[in-house]
Amino acid sequence: MEGAIHVRIGQNLQRIRKQRGLSLDKLAALTNVSKGMLHQMERGDIQPTVTIVWKIATGLNISFSSLLRDDDAAVVVATPAHIPHVTEDGGRCRVYMLFPFDPQTRMELFTMVLDAGTDFTSTPHQQGVYEFLTVTDGTLQMNIQGESYTLQTGQAIRFAGHTAHQYINPSATITTVQVTMYYNEEE
């Protein structure tokens, strides 16, 4: 997976928009992202946050990784340190796409790294999206529809992604989480 992630996102966004015959105005209306920002993204001028990428994916009813993916290969070995990533909370939350959406399994896989004290509220995803999280290192507090769940290394949680949810690292060290997104409905 080569190339700057913001350039790849822009190319994928423009390709999807044109395939659907959407103007930038129509895309802005569907995604609640400004026309100016969408134009800058398509040109590869800006690095969108995780929130912006999710808003676009939700508005277009596509998987998150549809905007991040590169050409598919028969065998891929993914190492987060060598994969371009998108960020949130001023870079304190980093999301590394390990494996993009696969239409056969209806899943995509990410690694999320949260610096100490990071608090990231996710935009609710479209209906039919489920998140499966496994804490591989550290402590993760999840707030899901007003309920709080604290997970330690080795623990996992599953929830409907269309609900309000928040990822919090309450500890003084980095927390690493494996995220599997399952899309129940067709893209």
Image (spheres, rainbow, N blue to C red):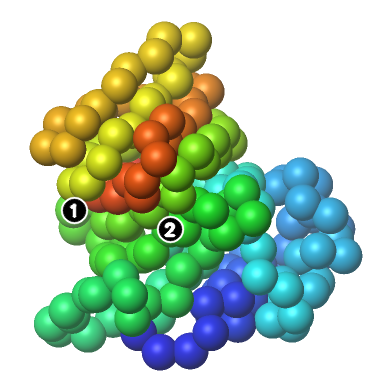
Residue 176 x %, y %: 30, 50
How far apart marks 1 and 2 lie (CA) works out to 21 Å
Q: Nearer the viewer, residue 137 or 49?
A: 137
Residue 113 x %, y %: 38, 53
Residue at 21% x, 31% y: name it: 152
Q: Nearer the viewer, residue 44 or 128?
A: 44
Q: Are marks 1 and 2 in contact (CB under 8 Å)?
A: no
Residue 146 x %, y %: 49, 10
Vertical side of 164 occupied by 86: above or below: below
Left or right: 57 as drawn, with respect to 187: right
Q: Nearer the viewer, residue 16 or 47?
A: 47
The quadrant of the image that shows the N terminus is bottom left
* Res. 112 visible in picture: yes
Q: Secondary structure at mark 1?
A: loop
Residue 56, labelled with which disc? none
What is the total number of numbered labels drawn onto the structure image? 2
Give the farthest residue toward the top: 147
Q: Earlier in the sequence, mark 1 or mark 2?
A: 2
Left or right: 6 as drawn, with respect to 155: right
Q: Quadrant of residue 7?
A: bottom right
Mark 1: which amino acid?
Thr
Residue tagged by mark 1? 105
Mark 2: which amino acid?
Val
Residue at 17% x, 79% y: name it: 77
Vertical side of 104 occupied by 122: above or below: above
Residue at 53% x, 84% y: name it: 4
Residue at 50% x, 52% y: name it: 93
Instruction: Name the front one of labels 1 and 2.
Output: 2
Crowding around mark 2 (Cα neighbors within 10 Å: few <14, some 14 to 19, many 20+) is many
Residue 95, labelled with which disc? 2
Q: Secondary structure at mark 2?
A: strand
